[in-house]
Amino acid sequence: APETGGWPELVPSLEEAIRGSDLMVKGTGVAPRARTAAALEAVHALLKGYQHFRDPCAAREDAPAELEVITSSLLGGLAGTFTATATGAMEAGPSLCGPHAGLLLTLCKCFHHTVLSYMPRALAGAPLQGWVEGMLRLLEAFDLGAAASAPSLEGLKVAKRAAQALLALVTRHRRHVEALVPRVFSAACRMAAGSG
């Protein structure tokens, strides 16, 4: 993870790469400057460093300033991309193996690593609700039987990562998602029962 002031150009460069990536400029006549998958993998690699607390002995630890910058600049804007990609996966069927299942998995990983330990202030509120609602809709549409017989395991991985992210929210940041706990519990019970 970058130290404060260590890589000041990194987040703006990633933001620009995402905005100019192939799926973001598709149909606009603008030549893409990067692949969306590659840009999202870079965001994921950046966020992975924040999945653990800096000081495990501290009773309460605020999100690092770098994570706040990353969240406000990148993750908030990716909520719309996540919703669109999740909708495409759900339209592809209950196995969640849509045309961009790999991107959906990377987006789920980005969100999961962001909330695993910390709750950035930039994510709390409307951006968080958008991510959580999308993940709940994914799990509610998911069918374990359909995913197990699908030619790709991407749908299983997406559902697993969405469930892990929701678990992190419920166990670590419950006050932010209290109203959604019954839906999370229902989706988890449905998955444990084999979807049926």
Image: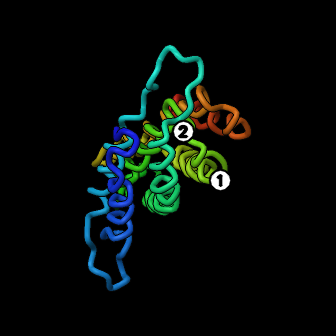
Q: Quadrant of the C terminus?
A: top right
* Horizontal relation, residue 107 to residue 58: left or right: left
**Residue drawn 59% across the image and 27% down it:** 172
Q: Of the residues under marks 2 and 1, which one precedes in the sequence?
A: 1
What number is the disc on residue 196?
2
Residue 70, position as x, y percentages in the image: 45, 49
Check the image and tell me how it is coloured: rainbow
User: Is residue 143 visible to the viewer in this orientation of the structure?
Assistant: no
Quadrant of the rendered image containing residue 144: top left
Q: Nearer the viewer, residue 140 or 194?
A: 140
Residue 167, position as x, y percentages in the image: 55, 31
For mark 1, does the 10 Å Cα neighbourhood hold few (<14), some (14 to 19), or many (20 or more) residues? Answer: few
For mark 2, does the 10 Å Cα neighbourhood hold few (<14), some (14 to 19), or many (20 or more) residues? Answer: few
**Residue drawn 36% across the image and 38% down it:** 3
* Type of amino acid at the residue the image marks with label 2: Gly
* Type of amino acid at the residue the image marks with label 1: Ala
**Residue drawn 29% across the image and 47% down it:** 152
Query: Which residue is labeled 1 in the image?
Result: 126
**Residue drawn 52% across the image and 29% down it:** 192
Mark 2: which secondary structure? loop
What's the distance in space between the residues labelled 2 and 1, CA to CA?
Answer: 32 Å
Q: Residue furthest front?
A: 5
In the displayed structure, 112 sits above or below 25; it is above
Residue 39, position as x, y percentages in the image: 30, 57
User: Is residue 76 visible to the viewer in this orientation of the structure?
Assistant: yes
Residue 62, position as x, y percentages in the image: 56, 32
* Horizontal relation, residue 169 to residue 65: left or right: right
Q: How many numbered badges does the structure rendering display?
A: 2
Mark 1: which secondary structure? helix
What number is the disc on residue 4?
none
Q: Quadrant of the N terminus?
A: top left
In the displayed structure, 126 sits above or below 157; it is below
